[in-house]
Amino acid sequence: MDFGAGVNSSQESAVDLETVLDDPLWFLDAVDPAGCGFSFVKTSRALLQESAFLDHRMSEATGPRADFTLTAGDFATIESPHSAYDPAGFIFHTSFCRSTLLARALHREGASFSLKEPGAMVSLAHGLRAAGAAVGEGERAGLIDAVLTFLGRPLAQGERVLIKPSNFANSLLPAVLAQGGRVLLMYSELRPLLLSILKRGEEGRIFVRRLFNALRMDPVAVANIPAPQAMLFTDLEVAALVWRQQMETFVEALQSWPDAGLRSLDADVLRARPEETVRAAFDFFEIEADEKDVREVVQGAVFMQDSKQADRPYSPAREAEMAREAERVFADSIARTLDWASQARLRTDIALPLARPLLG
């Protein structure tokens, strides 16, 4: 295969691009849109499966690296033995809504493989934000297609790849929909999100402010908020705006893509009806699983462990107690924020539950 003069292997590894294309365990770790740089790490099925998030926390534990530069012309000439595989399925989400749990539940050896928050999608989204008009539309489309192609390579014949992107990559939703893959939009209502932020203390507050700053670089409604005004928002108001912007993006997607490949899921539905939800999700993503498989998932380790820290057991009672404590300590702040958020329409009305629910 001839990949053109624009491809250069990193000095860190003698591996060539053809080898990387032929082996999906050369995992795409990061992307530099401005320089058309693609960075891969050699990893294993076990590490990809066990890592709660496939970002820097995963890549620090991997083997050799290989870096390549691809020009716009190279995107059209890249070929792979995996070029005929089905598009990956995606779970886009609004944060702290049990999306990691669902991604883990849908991982089924030999039938599906879940990738949780790959860092390459975040670096792609951030890079495109920073580059702005310096990356033309054609090159932008080629970059996105290449990233989705690399991430969507099945690790075994017949496996369906599922990708749960980070919120910081939600700007890529239109491009993913345009590829024709199946997409599930997972969300919670605002109150549970506020409680989740509060339970995480300063870490949660920093997270929503970082996400707010990222969203303000996208062509969305929050980008029109003047910086002096944005500085006056409380942390919970920032969280409410972040939630609102993501929900409006989901509403607009549901309105713009009247396709059978797009569904929504309220986190409370997964909590209240786990077996039905997992069954419906397997069916939606066209993953082969029978009733016994579903029961084993719902009654097994996935639902008994902390989704983000597998060495910790999950305790619904403990989660409920923490939520009650946050409600008690921050009752006034939560009430004020919910009242404020009820008037904070950005561009689109939101009616809950969202349209086209996974469970009718």
Image (cartoon, helix red, strand yellow):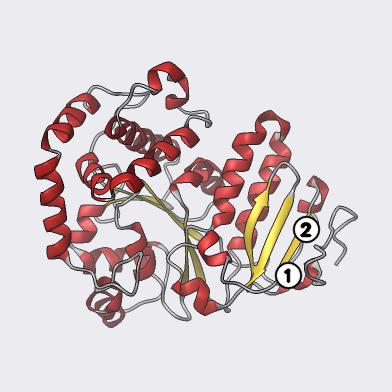
Number of disc labels: 2
Asked whether, in this view, residue 108 is left or right of residue 297, the answer is: right
Q: Residues within 10 Å of mark 2 (few under 14, many from 20)?
A: some
Q: Secondary structure at mark 1?
A: helix
Cα–Cα gap, marks 2 and 1: 10 Å
Residue 253 in the image: state x and y as whole percent: 43, 39
Q: Please tell me whether mark 2 or mark 1 is closer to you in this view.
A: 2
Instruction: Identify the residue shown where x is 33% and y is 37%.
Output: 243
Disc 2 residue type? Phe
Q: Which mark is residue 20?
A: 1
Q: Relative to residue 79, is residue 180 depicted above or below?
A: above
176 up-or-down from 136: above or below? below
Q: In this orientation, which residue lies closer to the viewer: 262 or 194? A: 194
Residue denoted by label 2: 68
Question: Which residue is situated farthest in the right direction here?
Answer: 5
Closer-to-camera residue (121/356):
121
The answer to whether residue 159 is seen in the rendering is: no
Disc 2 on helix, strand or loop? strand
Which mark is drawn over residue 122?
none
Q: Vertical placement of 249 versus 320: above or below?
A: above
Res. 105 image quadrant: bottom left
* 198 horizontally vs 186: left or right: left
Q: Is residue 128 left or right of residue 78?
A: left
